[in-house]
Amino acid sequence: MRFVKGHGTENDFVILPDPDGALDLTPEAVARLCDRRAGIGADGVLRVVRTKAADLGADLGADLGSGAEWFMDYRNADGSVAEMCGNGMRVFARYLVDAGLAAPGEWDVATRAGLRRVSLGASGDVSVDMGPPELLGYGEASLAGTAFQGRRVSVGNPHLACRVDGPVDALDLSHAPGFDPAVFPDGVNVEFFRSVGERHVEMRVYERGSGETRSCGTGTVAVAAAAAQGAPGTSEWTVDVPGGRVTVTLDGRTSHLRGPAVLVAEGETRPDWI
Ligand SMILES: N[C@@H](CCC[C@H](N)C(=O)O)C(=O)O
C-alpha cells in the first residue's frame, strides 16, 4: 500500500492514494497505520478516492457526485469515520496538487459533510471554505473533576468550545474530557481556548477518535465562532495551537480556514505487515 505522510500545524495524517476505490480500508487497518509505535503514526488517515469510485451510499453520492472529482475519506486514529477534517482538507489539497492530480487554483472537494472549496497555489498556505459554523447552544465537559462550560458548535462535525481563564498549557488533557452522551450522542471534539489579544486566541483540543492533537482545523473554526458569539460583520481570528498558527475568517455567511500543509515522506507498507 503506497502512502504519503503529511501534516497541517502538526495535525498529522497518513495519506492513502486510492483513486479507483480499490482499498478495503477496515477500522483495524486504520488504527494500525496510525499507531505511533507499531505503525506509521498519525492522528488520522486521508484516503484519496475519486468521488465516482467512492462507496458513498445513495444520498451522499447523489449530493456530491457531480460537484467534485475527489472525495476526502477521513478516518480518526481509532478507525472511526468523521464527517470533516479542516487540517486534513488542506493536506489533502496539497497532496492532489503535488501529485499532479489537480492544478493549483480553486476547486471543490467532496466530504461526508458536503462540498468544501479549497484555494491554493503551487506552494504555500492552503485556504478552505469551511461553510457556516452553527452555534447550537451550550454544553459542558469535565476534566479531572472540574466542569467547563462551552458553546456547542457544528462545523460539519461536533464541537464543544470552552473558554478558560488561565493558560491552556496548564490543562491536563492526558485523559478524555467527560461529557453527557445525551447531549452529544455521536461524541464530541472538545476545545479549550483563552483570549490572548484582540481576535487572537490560544487553544488546545481533545479530538473524538484521536485524543489530544496538536491542532484541529474544524476546532479552530468552532473556537473562532464561539469567541465571536455571532457578532455581525467580517472578522479575522488568529488561532494559536500547540502545532502552530492558523487564521479563521468569519463573515456571517461562511468561514475560511487558512494555514500550512506540509508533505514530509512517502513510502510503501510491507504486504506482510498490513
Ligand atoms: N483534526 C480534524 C478533525 C478530525 C475529525 C474529528 N476528530 C472528529 O471525529 O470529528 C480537523 O482538523 O478538523
Image: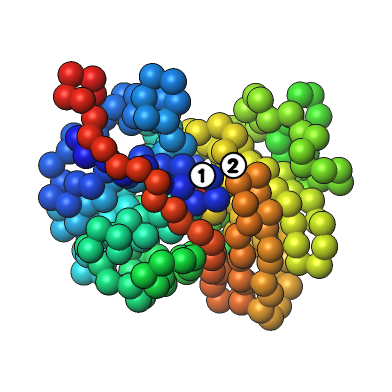
Q: Nearer the viewer, residue 187 or 39?
A: 39
Q: Residues within 10 Å of mark 2 (few under 14, many from 20)?
A: many
Relative to 5, 36 lies left or right: right
Q: Nearer the viewer, residue 205 or 185?
A: 205
| Beta carbon at label 1 within 8 Å of ligand 1 | yes
| Residue at left offset 36%, top offset 75% | 106
Relative to 225, say whether 38 is above or below. above
Rendered-image quadrant of the C terminus: top left
Relative to 273, say whether 260 is above or below. below
User: Of callouts 1 and 2, which one flags the residue occurring earlier in the amino acid sequence?
Assistant: 1
| Beta carbon at label 2 within 8 Å of ligand 1 | no
Would you say residue 63 is visible in this rendering?
no
Q: Are marks 1 and 2 in contact (CB under 8 Å)?
A: yes
Relative to 33, 167 lies left or right: right
Q: Residues within 10 Å of mark 1 (few under 14, many from 20)?
A: many
| Residue at left offset 55%, top offset 69% | 255
The amino acid type of the residue labelled 2 equals: Arg
Q: In the image, residue 156 lies at what x, y percent?
A: 48, 55
Relative to 187, say whether 7 is above or below. below
| Residue at left offset 24%, top offset 30% | 269
Relative to 55, 233 lies left or right: right
Inter-mark Cα distance, 1 to 2: 6 Å
Would you say residue 127 is visible in this rendering?
yes
Relative to 52, say whether 37 is above or below. above
The amino acid type of the residue labelled 1 equals: Asn
Q: Which residue is mark 1?
A: 11
Q: In the image, residue 167 lies at what x, y percent?
A: 82, 43
Quadrant of residue 34 within the rendered picture = top left
Label 2 residue SS = loop
Q: In the image, residue 48 lies at what x, y percent?
A: 26, 50
Q: Which residue is mark 2?
A: 214
